Image (cartoon, rainbow, N blue to C red):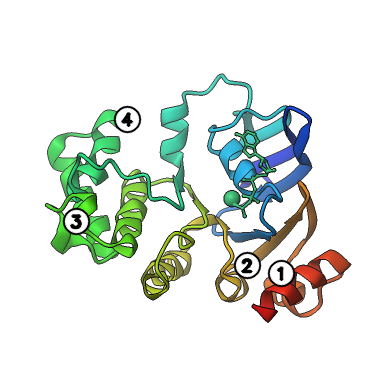
Amino acid sequence: MNDTILEVRHLSKSFGRNHVLKDIDFAVRPGDVTSIIGASGSGKSTLLRCINLLETPTSGEILFHGENIAGGKVNANSYRSKVGMVFQSFNLFNNMTVLENCMVGQTKVLKKSHEEAKANAMKYLEQVGMAPYIKAKPRQISGGQKQRVAIARALAMEPEVLLFDEPTSALDPEMVGEVLSVMRDLAKEGMTMLVVTHEMAFARDVSNHVVFMADGVICEEGEPKELFEHPKQDRTREFLSRFMER
Ligand SMILES: Nc1ncnc2c1ncn2[C@@H]1O[C@H](COP(=O)(O)OP(=O)(O)OP(=O)(O)O)[C@@H](O)[C@H]1O
Ligand SMILES: [Mg+2]
């Protein structure tokens, strides 16, 4: 248990009277690729946003290497360099080039020199196949390319964990594959990932752990093969069968 990177304990979050997360517990260990699935509104994004300090939990703890980060005491930028996040809508800086997007966090937060940041950015842009586009601005590249840049930007911070919130949901169908393929390669290399996704094939084939959320609770979790082939809860079965119909 000592090598646990992230541990969520009794996490609850309410927006007014809307109890969005109710007593969530789970852990992320090195090399885990955890997929979070569940219907719209079940609280998946809110959970990731709490873990990335974009929301403040109403109660409970989020432990990063045993230290509670939910109390407002940690420096958000330095924490986010270790627990990076990739968003559905890319969130690139539109006034910066592809290369600058992948350098700015390194120079501002990690205090790396321009040269070092550039070399590191290039390494990860090559990894995602975006090195030929370093001079482009986000508006000049496709959605799939933007998301690959966003992944390179996150990787350039050399995080311990990467959080993904539906990274392919805003993409045209023909671009989903290129992003999933980058994520598959990352998983193969042993990157620790927590992925909210509607891509059931990814959840089943790439992750080693699947969490099914419903109405703000973890309804069921387990190994992908087990959860997809032998769901224990009625709600999981309903969700999966509705999904397969589509
Ligand atoms: N900032 C906010 N203020 C008020 N309510 C919010 C806020 N963010 C989320 N909610 C509510 O919390 C609930 C869970 O939302 P959340 O975005 O976490 O769901 P989700 O599982 O990510 O859904 P989806 O699959 O559609 O992305 C919803 O009822 C939503 O309206
Ligand atoms: Mg969401």
Three-letter residue code for mark 3? Gln
Residue that appears at 42% across and 64% down = 186
Q: Earlier in the sequence, mark 3 or mark 4?
A: 4
Q: Earlier in the sequence, mark 3 or mark 2?
A: 3
Numbered mark located on residue 140 in the image: 3
The picture quadrant where one finds residue 179 is bottom left
**Counting other residues with Cα less than 10 Å from the Cα at mark 3, is it few (<14), some (14-19), or many (20 or more)?**
some
What residue does disc 1 label?
223
Q: Nearer the viewer, residue 21 or 4?
A: 21
- At numbered mark 1, what does the secondary structure look like: helix, strand or loop? loop
Residue that appears at 42% across and 50% down = 89
Q: Nearer the viewer, residue 210 or 94?
A: 94
| Left or right side of 208 for 124 | left
Q: Can residue 65 be seen?
A: no
Three-letter residue code for mark 4? Val
The Cα–Cα distance between marks 3 and 4, rounded to whole angstroms, is 27 Å
**Counting other residues with Cα less than 10 Å from the Cα at mark 1, is it few (<14), some (14-19), or many (20 or more)?**
some
Q: Are marks 3 and 4 in contact (CB under 8 Å)?
A: no
What residue does disc 2 label?
208
**Counting other residues with Cα less than 10 Å from the Cα at mark 2, is it few (<14), some (14-19), or many (20 or more)?**
some
